[in-house]
Amino acid sequence: MKPALITKNLSYWNRKLHIHLGLVLLLFIWLFSLSGLILNHGGWEFTSFWEQRKETKTVTAVAGLATLDSAATIGAVMQQLHLTGEVSQVTFAADSVDFRVAAPGRVSDLHVDKKRGVCFQKQLLYNGWGKLRGLHTFNGANKEHPALQPTWMVTQIWRLSMDGIALGLVFLCLSSWVMWYKLGKQRAWGAGVLAMGLAGAIYLVLLLKMF
Amino acid sequence: MKKYYPLVRQLHLYLGLFISPFILIFSLSALVFNHVDYINQVSPIKKLPDIKTRLQRIPYDTTDLATAKAILRTLNLDGEVDFISKDDDHISFPVHKPGLLTKIRVDTHTDSVVITRQEVGPLRAMTYLHAMPGQHNAKMRGNSGFIKVWRVLADTAVYLILFLSVSGVFLWWFLKVERTLGVYALLTGAFLFIGLLLLLLYPFP
């Protein structure tokens, strides 16, 4: 195949993918844009969630924990309480286990007394804005122990989706550069605009720390 | 509506080109947030030598932030003060610039200070920008010039992304050859979106 034809083909698919990938990602782009805006504007009254939270405290009898190790205890308690979510902040003691189960819009802090066979649960439920914030940041990453992977399959799927959306956005940016480059006489204006954006980004990421 | 097509196309192109480097910052940093363990392997944090020195004439009888900024001025440093910890003997605070984390700990009795610095690299610099101004410490956020600027840029980026997405749909609709495939692309996206939200917000017990 001639180089000119290859370039034409690549250009055709680049444009086609730019259009259709953008359409596939449309709702995700809106979700992350809106939630990002809300996270950066905590003072917006209409998006407040903390004051509207529903907080419940329950004590539940849990059976069959005596012979289980700590990890199995967590699984058994979650099953008996019909809880699902990402498990974190686990601390073990001789006769008790403390842990958190979280999903966007829902956080449960649990203290399991294995000796008495009871579980103390404090659950917070957030409104729609709280859920939206949660979706933006919910990736199961553990800052203290970065090597730990998410414990909940849904977290892994959501994390994978976030990776896909991020890579999709990278492609949308790069493909737009290709399409701009193919413009010919309009290229100069685009070069100026792109250079301004690039200069700002490079200054912030690489150069600012030197001054 | 079609008369607006050339204008929308120009705006989509030029605004998109301008904001694309910032979209890259948000996208790449999202990958870093999700794969911290991998990033720690490929881009380890570099600790710089500690600096020990002594301060003079620091006003402790004002707000914590004013004290922190006075300390920074004396040390000829700047950056965004993240938060401030204070007890009877010490005042300490981290100061961020994208790619550089400085921690300052001052003995308020002797005015001696220990400065620790970490070069965290461009990938973590992007995650810092991604998370700023963010939802924490809203009252003191924006205490440096660059975060004030970044706050505006980050908002601008979001509004422009929203514009680009809507204008993208507008432009696609007028491309008759792409319309059918585009509808399938939209439906696929909607199906994935709704499915994932149902999984996350209404999980099976």
Image (spheres, coloured by chain):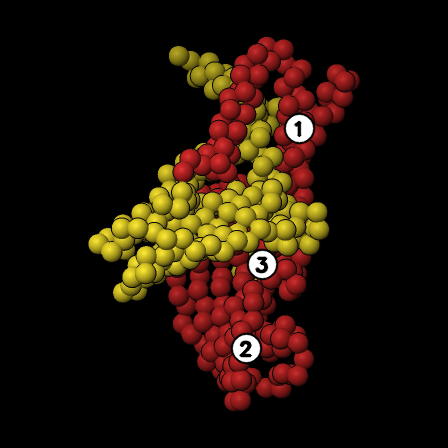
Disc 3 designates what residue? B136
| Front label number (1 vs 2) | 2
Query: Chain B is which colour?
Result: red
The answer to whether residue B151 shows anywhere in this view is: no
Residue occupying the point 69% across, 54% down: A43
Real-space CA distance between mark 1 and mark 2, rounded to the nearest whole angstrom: 48 Å
Q: Residue B161, image x and y in percent?
A: 63, 36
Query: Chain A is which colour?
Result: yellow
Residue occupying the point 63% across, 83% down: B60
In primary-sequence order, the first of circles 3 and 1 is 3
Q: Residue A199, image x and y in percent?
A: 60, 46
The amino acid beneath tag 3 is His
Residue B18 relative to residue A113: left or right: right
Q: Quadrant of residue A92?
A: bottom left
Residue A163 relative to residue A177: left or right: left
Q: Is residue A205 above or below residue A184?
A: below
Secondary-structure class at tag 3? loop
Please tell me the numbered disc located at residue B166: 1
Front position in the image: A59 or B152: A59
The amino acid beneath tag 2 is Lys
As drawn, the residue found furthest toward the bottom would be: B110
Q: Chain of mark 3?
A: B
Residue B162 relative to residue A168: left or right: right
Q: Chain of mark 2?
A: B
Disc 2 designates what residue? B86
Do tag 1 and tag 2 residues touch (Cβ < 8 Å)? no
Q: Chain of mark 1?
A: B
Front position in the image: A85 or B98: A85
Secondary-structure class at tag 2? strand
Residue occupying the point 49% across, 64% down: B101
Q: Are marks 3 and 1 on the same chain?
A: yes
